[in-house]
Image (cartoon, rainbow, N blue to C red):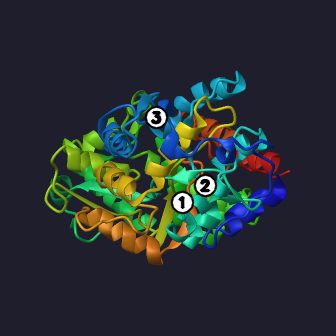
Amino acid sequence: MRRSFKLLAAAATLGLALTGCGGSGDNSADTAAPASEATGSVGVFTWWADGSEKAGLDALVDVFKTDYPDLTFDNLAVAGGAGSQAKSVLAAQLKAGTPPDSFQAHAGAELQDYIDADQLEDLTGFYEENDLTSQFPADLIDRLTVDGKIYSVPSNIHRSNVVWANVDVLKDAGIDPEKPAEDLDAWIADLEKVKKSGKTPLAVAGSWTQVQLFENVLLASLGVDGYNGLWDGATDWKGEDVTKAIESYKTVLSYTNSDRDSLSDWAPATQLVQDGAAAYNLMGDWAEAKFTLDGDKAGTDYTYFPMPGTAGVFNFLADSFTLPVGAPNPAGAKAWLTTIGSAEGQTAFNKVKGSIPANTTAKTDDFSEYQKSAIDDFSKDQIVSSLAHGAAVPVAWLNELSTAVSKFGGDGNVATLQESAGATAEKFAE
């Protein structure tokens, strides 16, 4: 797997070309009846079970029902932000040979484990049939391509390195909401100002939200090349620069809410900012959907900016849908994937979800100002792959590193986290 991961991270701004096996010899994506002839029920597995994420799924399903009135959508959602719970349930189903018709995953390295296990069908022919290669950005197509094949259809493009802030809390702490800190040290100084004002400086939740904070502190500390090097072996996990980055993470974590580990998902942490109990929340731009759904106004109630130290960098992830080997209704799955990739489906879904369309022909005139800024940033920023959301490393690597980060949240031992992260990188790079 060494060659695969060097390609994945080192080519983060240019695309990836992973090696690996995958897909059955008899590809049901090609042999199934056309999507237009599909009937019956289509079981779709996601982790969009409630809140703004469920609202986005509902918008997409409405388009699907219009596109395919003879098909019934079977919602198989399992709650759990970033798929933390859903992935375990899905793994059991795939192992038992009872896959859904399509399941949500993160585009990038997260798919590698499924491909290596021959659990995904090759969708290259599907892309050709639907002319998707001309409608998706070239660098995104590269990121989806594994040994010349494509195994998923992205429904969106998300950004993970966004800080959301309560305007009034910042003002009360003597911080100008329109002038965010330019680097990590300056942000830590602002966190201290908020602490002295009596509010929680930074709201986070458990497990994966802390990994997301960790990845962005690494990015802010190490820069694009240093961050990418963590995943392709070019950056030494034992180096002094990584030690300093982890020490910075420890400092930032010290400004977070004391009940962070009791918050099971991202939304309660974002709510602390909305309620004025906390100043900042480092969260992916699905938070934009929550602010909008709850009636908050950008510039008045909340503001947003790239994580200090990461301006000009777009920390990328994408929700993507697959056709599993052995899907009960492959024709129905192709119908679902057709709606996923369509301009109409992506417009409806992303407008509600807070993300931006992967399909460049989707209409975005009435998207939020944040989303318009994200579209612009994606077109010009350096792009890196998110650790916490499956774009940078495969599931097994992420799981081990997540365990180490979670343990660090309790003991704060920099040397132990650094050693564990380095050992994990060596293990999976072999």
Residue 262 image point, x, y percent: 41, 27
Residue 31 image point, x, y percent: 68, 44
| Residue situated in front as seen by the camera: 105 or 295 | 105
Q: Earlier in the sequence, mark 2 or mark 3?
A: 3
Q: Is residue 392 left or right of residue 333?
A: right
Closer to the camera: disc 2 or disc 3?
2
Alpha-carbon distance for marks 2 and 1?
A: 6 Å
Total label count? 3
Q: Is residue 251 visible?
A: no
The residue to which callout 1 is attached is 130
Q: Earlier in the sequence, mark 1 or mark 3?
A: 3
Q: Is residue 102 visible?
A: yes
Q: Which mark is residue 47?
A: 3
| Residue situated in front as seen by the camera: 51 or 149 | 149
Q: Kindly identify the residue that appears in the image at 49 percent across and 68 percent down.
A: 135
**CB within 8 Å, label 2 to label 1:** yes
